[in-house]
Image (tube, rainbow, N blue to C red):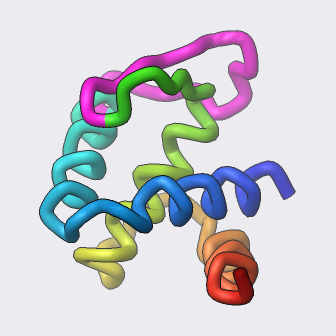
Amino acid sequence: MAVTMYCLDALQNFADKTPEQIKEIGYEIAMLARHGLDPSDNEKRIHIGLIPNKEFTPLQLLAFMYVAWQTFEPELDMNLDFKNEYLLAKQMFEKK
């Protein structure tokens, strides 16, 4: 359920952004993920430049990256099994 809520948070954060801004966020997170993000580490907090004043857990950051990439390259296999959580979050977002 946490991933669903993180995906919903991402959708809400991206609602006022252009596709290019979302793409830039996705790339920024992907660059961080190259060095490894441990989704089980709930203590670590990460800041990214394109979303100031917000800190992320690794799992939350991976969910944001997943949502970002779904907007501009949904067929890419990211080795993240967040599809069901993303679809549920998208339904919740669209009902608001």
Residue 80: % across, % down:
53, 59
85 relative position to 69: left or right: right
Residue 44: % across, % down:
62, 12
Residue at image location 32% in from the left, 83% down from the top: 75
7, 38: nearer the viewer? 7
Residue at image location 73% in from the left, 88% down from the top: 95
Q: Is residue 29 above or below residue 5?
A: above
59, 71: nearer the viewer? 71
Q: Quadrant of the C terminus?
A: bottom right
Task: Residue 85: name its quadrant.
Answer: bottom right
Residue at image location 56% in from the left, 27% down from the top: 56
86 relative position to 32: left or right: right
Residue at image location 49% in from the left, 28% down from the top: 37
- Magenta region: 34-50
Q: Is residue 60 above or below residue 37?
A: below
Q: Quadrant of the N terminus?
A: bottom right
47 relative position to 94: left or right: left
SS majority, magenta: loop
49 relative position to 24: left or right: right
